[in-house]
Image: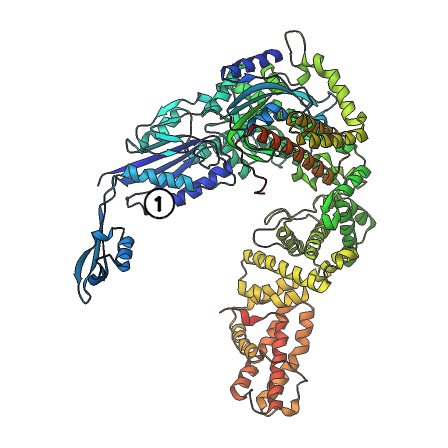
Amino acid sequence: MKKNDVLFELTVENIPARFVLIAKKQLQEKLLELMKNSRLEFGDIKIYSTYRRLTVFIYSVSSRTEKVIEKAYGPNARMLKDENGNYTKAAVGFAKACGVKPEELKTAFVEKKGEVLYAQRVIPSINAEKVLSDVFKEAIKSLNFPKSMIWEDSKFVFARPIRNILAIYGTRLIPLEIAGVKSSKFTYSSYFTGFKKISIKKPDEYFNQLDKNCVMADDEKRKKALENIIKGVEERVKATVKKDEDLIEENLYLAEYPSGVLVKFSSDFLKLPKELLNLVLKKQLKFFAILDEKSNLLPFFLGIRDGLSVGHKNVEEGFLNVFKARCADAIFFYDLDLKTDKLIFEEKLKSMLFQKELGSMYDKGLRVRSVVKMLANEFKIYDENLINASKYIYYDLASSVVNEFPELEGIMNYYYANNYGIYDEQIKLAISEIYLPVANDSKMPSNQYSSLFSVAHKIDTLVGDFILGIIPNGSNDPHGLRRYALGIIRTVYENDFNINLKKLIKFSYDSYPDDIRNKKDIKTLEDEILDFIYQRLESYLESKKFGVDVINSVKSIFLKEGDEARAIKRIEVINSLKNIDDFRNFALIYKRLKNITKDFTPKSNIDTTLFEKDEEKKLYDSFIKISEQVNRSINDSDFKTAAMEIIKLREPLESFFNTVLVMVDDEKIKNNRLTMLKNIYNLFIEISDISQISY
Amino acid sequence: MYFQNLINSLNDYWIKQGCIMVQPYDLEKGAGTFNPATFFGVLTTKPTAVCYVEPSRRPADARFASNPNRLGKYYQYQVVIKPPHKDIQKVYLKSLEAIGIKISEHDIKWIEDDWESPTLGANGIGWEIWLDGMEITQFTYFEKMASFDLFPVTVEITYGLERLCMFSQKKDNIFDIMWNEKITYGEVHKEMEKQFSVYSFEKSDVDRLRQDFDYYEKEVLRLTKDSLFYPAYDMVMKASHSFNLLMARGTISVAERANLIKRIRDMARLCADEYVKGTKAEVKDQKELK
């Protein structure tokens, strides 16, 4: 059959980058599904987009669907009509299921069944334009955006108003109407060429025609162009353009024909904090910062313009002016903050709510301070300067800069530190890094004071929320507690910030006033938070390539001890041993040990006088011999030595199981044997429940 | 293009597009959207097309005339059309050509910016329009006003006149804009700007402003009972301005701010209710759905 390519282009008023990407993904999936059900043959489906176009190519589509004859056999022929000559319920039902009228039913002979009802339905051949019309209508209707609108009488729902539809199959129009717009064989150029009408005669001339009219409709090609612009600028200024992926993506969907505008600015502006300047460039202006080899900002930026180079000077001048205007604002706020007395920040903090039941940000600061004190004592780094500094960790929240640029919370404390009377570089960093790490792979607190402040800040929120029962579930985590928990986990592990989590929870709990503490007892709180942290720990360690079985084998001991560092040490040991033969064999016998002692709780000590067999005595002696060493090693967190000792019990255990029957009738003897086994079981459980290791 | 000619050109252009040119409303307001022509105009299904200059006051944005880009009092140019033209984007871009900006020689970006006015209970979907990086226009399809769902949608196009003029005259300081061939914007407004900055940040009578706010609120209740929604709406604008002045003094806590905003929103809603009743407009009531 003859085949042709399909071109469909939807023109809409400007849609933001994230919407375009959502639409592309949904459209790809939906079209594939619809085309598979369409009875048309088809090849690849490709989707392209700009900020105002969604373009679909479907290659090699057959010109019509095949005529199909569907046959179906139903109930016995006698069931056609009842004694009154009316169609029976069964016959009507069968006809309906086959999509025919009861009078169209025939009878046919089927072997072993005899004469039965028979229906035949002819699905006629339909031309491709007709089928595709329905496919596109359905596909476009199915798109879901984070935010949509209605704008015309049919009340079609879409991200932004649809203004044109180009739809052709080969050279033929695919007739359709969406949101009051009828399809045509035309599209329009971009605004800077005056929305010129462009006729598209067949799909394969689409890109060329648009290119001629200054539209790069292919995202990949546009991205290449953008990368070349960046490369060109780098060569020109002999420096690096800060290649922020988000920013590249955003610019990709802000221009149909990107061209670069390199702008030089006065180095006076470099006096602004670099984080602030970066934010002005990226967030407020969508411009690319340019950096020297030490990642310091240089007095240049790269702006992306939509259009040709006509009037390049205008644009360059405009970009510079708007940059200056934005910086003037930033400088105004920054200077204002530098002139503001810290007591004014303090006053503002008192009126800034942390959470209704948990007081103001000032109150939170006081609690964190008391946790910092306890932690500093614990780590024996108690220092008056440090404790005093912890008072200021939230002060920048009251500053004008953070009010304007919330992303700079924390960071600004570094720049305001002198106003707080803090001059020590380490401590300056500490008060500016309390939110770190902000994401899974982001920067960690850079020194031990930073770690301390950051952990104290996070545990306060966790404990407060858990006391109030604000516990994340599903996608609902309004205060980012999962991120906070992960932050603590990473700081403990990656920064070697070795604090027992139970102790940490207790410190924070004690910093809350009685009326809050009375809402939940410490034991329940510990259990809930440790369990919550464990879930994060599990996925964190999974990302470090540890097996779930190995991780889970230390779950109960972690929940009991609350010691993350020890839990991870155990995991590392088990992971390194698990494939050694002796270990594996011990693990297998350990499972047996676990099963047999599952429901047993020892009520007395092992009574050696009740031993009947040598194997019993031997096992007992081996157990006594190693247990002291094992306990000492576990105490010293030397889990490897402990594990190696315990697996020595494999042989006596095997002999024991081979010769001794545990479940004997004599209760005393039975219980004595179970007691010994349980003690052995309990010895290893202090390292890990290796019965969970899967082999 | 001189400041006064800019206004004239926009008037001429939008009048040609079928807008009626109304005049600024004679009360203080934070934005052109507060003008009754917009506030009430969008609530009905009746087609509307109006344009006007609107002096707007944002006390907290005042900078003692020392910032080259910010003012506590400035001018907006407002276009409100319902239903909007199918090629409204093109119609808008042509308005820039009408004031001497050659589109092909500049960079224009439509940046996602859904607009919301919690005090009016209004929101919409739209963009900031950047001309060579500078935000010159807010372009919004209204979806809600005074908590009423709106259909058909209204497009609101708001130009920042000073910004546009700075751009057109290549000035980097608002006060250097030429009003006509002799007089600068600074000569017309600088002293006023300074005095109002002092008033807004230092001299306004905070206690009195709070009392005024309460009084206006009472008036709204009293007047809407008699279906006098126009005078009542004046009181909403006055309350909103008192609130803005209070905000500029920095004496309002987060919680109080939210509360005051809600009170203004409720006032605006009462006026809209009466208007809709009075004109029997076909608007869907969203109150119950919330």
Q: Look at 68% across and 66% down and name the residue there.
A: A561
Is the residue A633 above or below the residue A11 in the image? below
Q: Amino acid at mark 1?
A: Leu
Label 1 element class: helix
Residue at image mark 1: A34
Q: Look at 76% across and 51% down and name the residue there.
A: A368
Q: Position of residue B153 (x, y in %)?
A: 51, 30
Task: Choose between A308 and A296: the one closer to the eye.
Answer: A308
Q: Position of residue B206 (x, y in %)?
A: 80, 30
Q: Say how many tags the image has.
A: 1
Q: Is A576 left, or right, of A515 in this rendering?
A: left
Label 1 CA crowd tier, 10 Å (few <14, some 14–19, many 20+): some
Task: Choose between A139 and A567: the one closer to the eye.
Answer: A139
Q: Residue furthest top?
A: B182
Q: Position of residue B69 (x, y in %)?
A: 67, 22
Give the position of the C terminus of chain B as an image quadrant: top right
Chain on which label 1 sits: A
